[in-house]
Image (tube, rainbow, N blue to C red):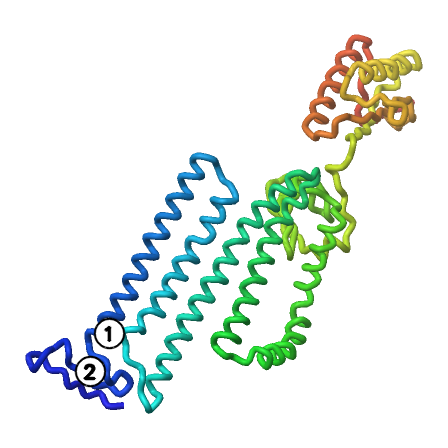
Amino acid sequence: MTASVTAILGAGDWWSETVNYEIVRGNTIWRFMLVLLVVIAAMVAARIVQFAISGYAGRLVRKKGETSLTLLLKAIVKPLYVAMFAGGIFCAKLPLYFNDEDGIRLSVSEGWTTIAQAVAAIAVAYALYRLVDVVEYYLDRLVGRTETTLDDMLVPVARKAMRITIAIIAALLIAENVLGTDVKSLLLGAGVGGIALALAAKDTIANFFGSITIFADRPFQMGEMIKIGEHTGPVEEVGFRSTRIRTLQGHLVTIPNSVIVNTCVENIGKRPFIRRTSNLTITYDSGHVRTDRAVEIVKEVLADVPEVNADAENPPRVYFSDFNDWSLNIYMSYWVMPAEYWLYQEVNERVNFEIMKRFEAEQIEFAFPSQTLYVKKD
């Protein structure tokens, strides 16, 4: 290409001089300046429309709250800007002269149109990508009517899946229909590499199917206390790859879903009550009278606690169970309802204090590990 420029300032009409590049021969400078003005005007107009729609959506939110209409307006405002920019690119070529027998400028015209079509297609795909927020809004309302909380976590997972699907399909359609790329050959080659990739990512695939199993089987709900292996805590998040639980020590533990589906999951949050089992030890000096009285005291204390379950299936159990090396053993077992951990600790404290008070009044002494040594004197 020749790079000589015949336009010289002060020589003739500057606006009618021709820039003598081979590709743009026949187009005067004012045509290129008009192209720039058209692009700038399209961007300014798109920005004005974007500002107007965003302002209207904001007023609706303040007046009526978040609705499907406001979500729709927020979803299309940015893609609309891209679409108007694509229209500006297409209109910007109109002032230029492309009709030439050598075909060079015709190819430039076709390429210009292709770029505008690609940007417009990206705007449509971007709009579909943003409209997933509207779908999520209705999914949230749908799952809000169910009793289970695990499907609440399914909504963001479905949102991510829909967005990834839209992005992949849009990229393939734009590449094939707009840019003219042979997508079939590309996919065929990717399929061969996909086998190797699948073998390398088998753990990721196992975790993905593990998440599907969790959502289908629902062994636990969001927020429920569970125990997996040595980790115990409430469930905070269930994703495609892993599940996160917050331990009682405050640590956030991430467990792969493939491990969860192949491991025994103890759902502590599903228990209807919390059981306490304890052994009260009293001294041998208590004798059978005070021992019998100790058993009666424990039964009376448990009968006066409303949170202690007293139904026919799980009544409180109190027995004089054994003769220890250093004490008489009284076995005590009861169930606390509802199954709230801190309520359980509060009930235990009340029971302990009341037993201590009643034992002191009856002069029943608790035993502790001890040995008595007898020394024989000659």
Q: How many marks?
A: 2
Q: Secondary structure at mark 2?
A: loop
Quadrant showing the C terminus: top right
Residue at (40%, 39%) from the top-left corner? 59
Looking at the picture, how far across and down is residue 321, in whole percent?
Answer: 91, 25
Whether residue 343 sits left or right of residue 177 in the image: it is: right
Asked whether the viewer can see residue 233, the reply is no
Looking at the picture, how far across and down is residue 167, in whole percent?
Answer: 54, 64
Asked whether the viewer can see residue 56, the reply is yes
Looking at the picture, how far across and down is residue 176, in whole percent?
Answer: 53, 76
Structural crowding at the residue carrying mark 2, measured as other residues with C-alpha within 10 Å and reported as few (<14), some (14–19) or many (≥20): some
- Name which quarter of the figure residue 212 lies in: bottom right
- Name which quarter of the figure residue 306 lies in: top right
Label 1: which residue? Answer: 32
Q: Residue furthest top?
A: 361
Labels 1 and 2 touching (C-beta < 8 A): yes
Q: Look at label 1 and name its amino acid.
A: Phe
Q: Which is nearer the eye, 151 or 268?
A: 151
Structural crowding at the residue carrying mark 1, measured as other residues with C-alpha within 10 Å and reported as few (<14), some (14–19) or many (≥20): some
Whether residue 235 sits left or right of residue 376 in the image: it is: left
Q: Look at label 2 and name its amino acid.
A: Val
Q: Is residue 112 above or below residue 271?
A: below
Quadrant showing the N terminus: bottom left
Q: Which is nearer the eye, 95 or 316?
A: 95
Dot 1 or dot 2: first in sequence order is 2
Q: CA distance from mark 1 to mark 2?
A: 10 Å
Label 2: which residue? Answer: 19
Residue at (50%, 71%) from the top-left corner? 174
Q: Is residue 291 above or below residue 124?
A: above
Looking at the picture, how far across and down is residue 213, in whole percent?
Answer: 74, 54
